[in-house]
């Protein structure tokens, strides 16, 4: 039979290929997603660096993210299925005990709404933070961990322990402490621990960032004059370092 004249049959369009790939990956995710942390790779291979990451949530308990990479052999798409994280928010000015109460509240919500019983608990958080603990970036003798538990929003999973959460807070403290310029404080006869104590008092006394400058000025002037600070934060704190800070005059420049 002589060959037919005309165009050879066309292959699938890029859109069709992408749609087929997405359907195949979606099927694999639905079948295997219950296994927890799982990466399902599409066609391709080789060493590469991630070029783009796109995340999407497909269920109440899992998060699916598509990672697109460019390799020597072409484009690789990877779908990653992971447990959906919970979040705990520690506002500025929270004490250790208030943070423990927040941990307990979030754990109850996870149990009630998501039917997940996390390892985090109030008792465990208080136990981990009971003894003085100084982050690796800080050099001082302290009698409490207060001031080092950095306030922020933290992700946690079912298996996250209170010790891991506290370590995340200490790591976050170091990341932010490295950005603090202590030159002016040293010129005023203030130690790094004094600065931390004063910062903690300011956060406890203020309701909005706009008030920090005013409260800081009041604390500075009273320390300089050798006066009792007379603010609620000093009455609530029993830290020896705070008493020493109250008793020390600030040196004039």
Image: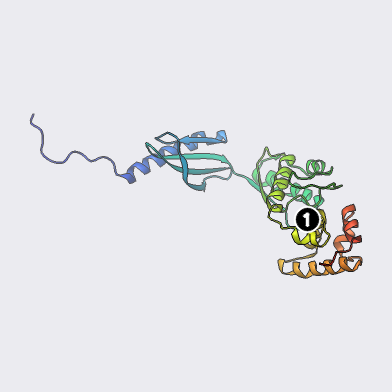
Q: Nearer the viewer, residue 61 or 75?
A: 75
Dot 1 falls on a residue whose secondary structure is loop
Q: Is residue 163 left or right of residue 40?
A: right
Residue 209 pos. (x, y %): 71, 66
Quarter-of-image position of residue 233 = bottom right
Q: Nearer the viewer, residue 101 or 249?
A: 249
Q: Residue at x 52, y 45 (%)?
A: 58
Quarter-of-image position of residue 208 = bottom right
Residue 73 pos. (x, y %): 37, 36
Q: Quadrant of the N terminus?
A: top left
Q: Residue at x 75, y 68 (%)?
A: 213
Q: Is residue 32 above or below residue 199?
A: above
Q: Is residue 149 visible?
A: yes
Q: How is the image coloured?
A: rainbow
Q: How many marks?
A: 1
Q: Nearer the viewer, residue 168 or 121?
A: 168
Q: Is residue 166 left or right of residue 22?
A: right
Crowding near the residue tagged with mark 1, few <14, some 14–19, many ≥20 C-alpha atoms within 10 Å: some
User: Residue reaching furthest top?
Assistant: 1
Q: Is residue 239 visible?
A: no
Q: Residue at x 91, y 65 (%)?
A: 228
Q: Is residue 235 above or below residue 102?
A: below
Residue 28 pos. (x, y %): 46, 35
Q: Quadrant of the C terminus?
A: bottom right
Residue 158 pos. (x, y %): 67, 39
User: Residue reaching furthest front?
Assistant: 253
Q: Is residue 222 above or below residue 54?
A: below
Residue to which mark 1 is pinned: 94
């Amino acid at each position: 039979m002589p060959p037919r004249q005309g165009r050879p049959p066309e292959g699938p369009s890029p859109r069709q290929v992408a749609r087929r790939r997405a359907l195949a990956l979606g099927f694999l995710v639905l079948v295997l997603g219950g296994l927890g942390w799982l990466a399902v790779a599409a066609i391709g291979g080789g060493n590469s660096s991630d070029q783009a990451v796109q995340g999407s949530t497909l269920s109440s308990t899992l998060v699916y993210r598509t990672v697109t990479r460019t390799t020597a052999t072409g484009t690789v798409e990877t779908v990653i299925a992971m447990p959906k994280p919970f979040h705990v928010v520690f506002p500025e000015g929270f004490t250790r005990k208030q943070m423990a109460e927040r941990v307990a509240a979030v754990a109850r919500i996870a149990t009630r709404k998501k039917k997940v019983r996390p390892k985090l608990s109030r008792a465990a958080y208080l136990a981990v933070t009971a003894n003085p603990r100084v982050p690796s970036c800080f050099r001082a003798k302290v009698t409490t961990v207060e001031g080092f538990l950095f306030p922020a929003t933290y992700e946690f999973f079912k298996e996250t322990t209170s010790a891991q959460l506290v370590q995340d807070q200490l790591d976050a403290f170091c990341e932010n402490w490295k950005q603090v310029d202590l030159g002016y404080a040293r010129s005023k006869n203030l130690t790094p621990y004094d600065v931390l104590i004063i910062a903690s008092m300011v956060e406890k006394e203020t309701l909005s960032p706009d008030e920090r400058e005013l409260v800081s000025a009041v604390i500075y002037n009273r320390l300089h004059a050798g006066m009792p600070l007379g603010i609620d934060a000093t009455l609530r704190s029993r830290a020896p370092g705070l008493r020493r800070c109250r008793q020390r005059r600030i040196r004039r420049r």
